[in-house]
Image (spheres, rainbow, N blue to C red):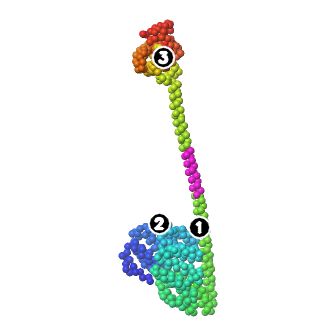
Amino acid sequence: MFAMVWHVATPAHALSDQEKLQRAEANRLDNHRQAQELIDSIDISNLSRKEKELYWYLKNWLRTFDGNDLLGIYERYGELVHTVESAEVKIRVLTSQLSLASYLGKWAEGFTMANKVQTLLSDSLSEAVQASTINGMITFYIKAEQPQIAKNLIQRFEPIAENVPGAKCLLGVQKIDLLLEQDLKQLSLNDILNTKLECERANNSYHALYSEMNLFYYLVETGNLQQAKVIMGPLEKKVETLDFVFMKTGFLAYVSELYKQQGQLVQAYETAQDVLSMDVEGQYLPTKIQALEILIDIAKQQANFEQAVAYMETLESLRAEFRELSVVKQAAFQQANFELALKQSQIDLLDKRNKLLETRSALSKARVQTTLIALCFVGVVMLGLLAWIWRSRKLQKKLSEMARIDSLTGIFNRGYFLQSVKQRLVKAQNKDLTCCLLLLDLDHFKRVNDSYGHQAGDWVLTEVVRTLKVVCDEQCTLGRMGGEEFAIFVYDTDLRSGLALAEQCRSAIEGIDTAHSGYRFPLTASFGVSDTTQVGYRFENLSSASDLALYQSKQYGRNRVYEYDINIEGQGATP
Ligand SMILES: Nc1nc2c(ncn2[C@@H]2O[C@H](COP(=O)(O)OP(=O)(O)OP(=O)(O)O)[C@@H](O)[C@H]2O)c(=O)[nH]1
């Protein structure tokens, strides 16, 4: 049963490190010594990260067989579970640690661990890993005296066991274990035989032997002593080859029971003593209790009451220990459940907080959106306002321009001309500069209007201004004083220069070709000139003086330039 076919065919040294790992994994239950040798011969530098994780798991797992350093392995599993990345190896490490927790009586940690395994157990794991995990959990809960949870897990195991090779064997073993513990009447011989068959089919020699032992227990418990005796001999040999103390002691306790029931008291006594001596650390209390009960029976039957009482005292203390352990288990279970509920309520609380935060963030998002919309709205309003301000400015500019400029000719109107000239006069006075004012009036302009129409009159006005602009330089300020009367203020210019300029203007107007208006007619203007040396810097005085001179121009024949003369009224000048 333990022969390794592959091992015979392929020597270990011919295998790659990956193959060694796979073989060790496949045969770890059937031949843990060979699996151990394979693991020890692996050069881990050839392994990938995931393979290394499996390697470390198996290395620790195989060390549990000698049973020497269970606590050390338990702790190493604890470290490993934090460093492992592979979800499958992680849950296997945790499940094995869970199994050790039950051996070491670490019930509180065990229940917490079992809850963690439960949360890690997901459909994303392979069904094989799911099967071995559930199997490990069932073992734990049976030992932890939580049969209901074990039953539920068995139900969960059933559909998976259909698909995973070898899993039916494990499922069968668990069902039988549970019934052996809980309700022997529900168990049938066929259940055990079928399970044994399943395990043999799956080449799971360990569980096939385990089932055979269960068969033996069942036969002894149900009083089928003859049948039990038949299988006892070969079974004893097989059990001998195993290193598991608990398997040996468990088996021997029933062997002792069989001997006792068959009246072979000496053999029964010796075998029961073997059980007690093998389990020095007293790890397997139920077996020890079973052995002591046999010893008490035998002592009573042999009327060795003193011995019986001594055994009974030991038995009582073991039972007390057992009960205490049971209480410890229940308490640990309650505590783990309480912690789980606490954790769940904390998670619920966090969930609620998160939801609250989410709502708050949604609210603030909505607020931000509203603010943005409001800002956009304000932006649009601001833009509208700016556009409106811009338009108003433009309008204002146009209005103020209209207030300053004569719309027909484009030069200053009377009002603004006055304002502007007055400022310049102040400036000139401060600098003691002489300025001139020329007034000109078109001659017989009414005739143009009357003869050729208002449009021709407008043309004349525009053309005259254009001509004046050509003649005048930047020192001149032009203004339309009314109808066909214009003024030219010349800054920093004396009367002589002013008269010369007036003459230039007169001549230029006279030279305008009126044919461009569509009509041919004479076009002339009369001029009156004065300066500040004559009348001072008051505009009104200057204007009156030039006006008087203009009047003289008109009086003395038009198309002339007259300067203001304070003494003589009606003095002539050019031409
Ligand atoms: N076409 C046109 N005519 C204007 C404008 N403003 C005033 N007038 C005309 O100018 C004429 C001025 O006539 P008057 O004051 O009698 O002077 P005048 O005909 O030039 O005669 P003298 O000044 O004596 O040479 C009037 O017929 C006004 O209607 C204008 O903006 N366009």
- Assign the magenta stretch its main secondary structure: helix
Q: Which residue is mark 1?
A: 340
Asked if residue 373 lies left or right of residue 472, the reply is right
Q: Amino acid at mark 3?
A: Asp
Q: Which residue is mark 3?
A: 450
Q: Examine the rendered structure and indicate whether residue 378 appears above or below residue 353.
A: above
> On the image, which quarter does residue 42 sit in?
bottom left
Q: Nearer the viewer, residue 211 or 242?
A: 211
Could you tell me which residue is drawn at 57 percent across and 71 percent down? Answer: 111
For the residue carrying disc 1, how many other residues have a C-alpha within 10 Å: few (<14), some (14-19), or many (20+)? some
Residue 457, percent from left and from top: 46, 19
Q: Examine the rendered structure and indicate whether residue 529 appears above or below residue 35.
A: above
> On the image, which quarter does residue 265 sit in?
bottom right
Whether the residue carrying mark 3 lies under 8 Å from ligand 1 is answered with yes
Discs 2/3, front = 3
Q: Examine the rendered structure and indicate whether residue 372 appears above or below residue 337.
A: above
Q: Amino acid at mark 2?
A: Glu
Labelled pair 3, 1 in contact (Cβ < 8 Å): no
Label 2 to label 3: alpha-carbon separation:
111 Å
Label 3 to label 1: alpha-carbon separation:
114 Å
Q: What SS does tag 3 mark? A: helix
Q: What SS does tag 2 mark? A: loop
Q: Earlier in the sequence, mark 2 or mark 1?
A: 2
Tell me the magenta residue range: 355-375
Q: Does the image show residue 278?
A: no
User: In which quadrant will I find the C terminus?
Assistant: top left
Labelled pair 2, 3 in contact (Cβ < 8 Å): no
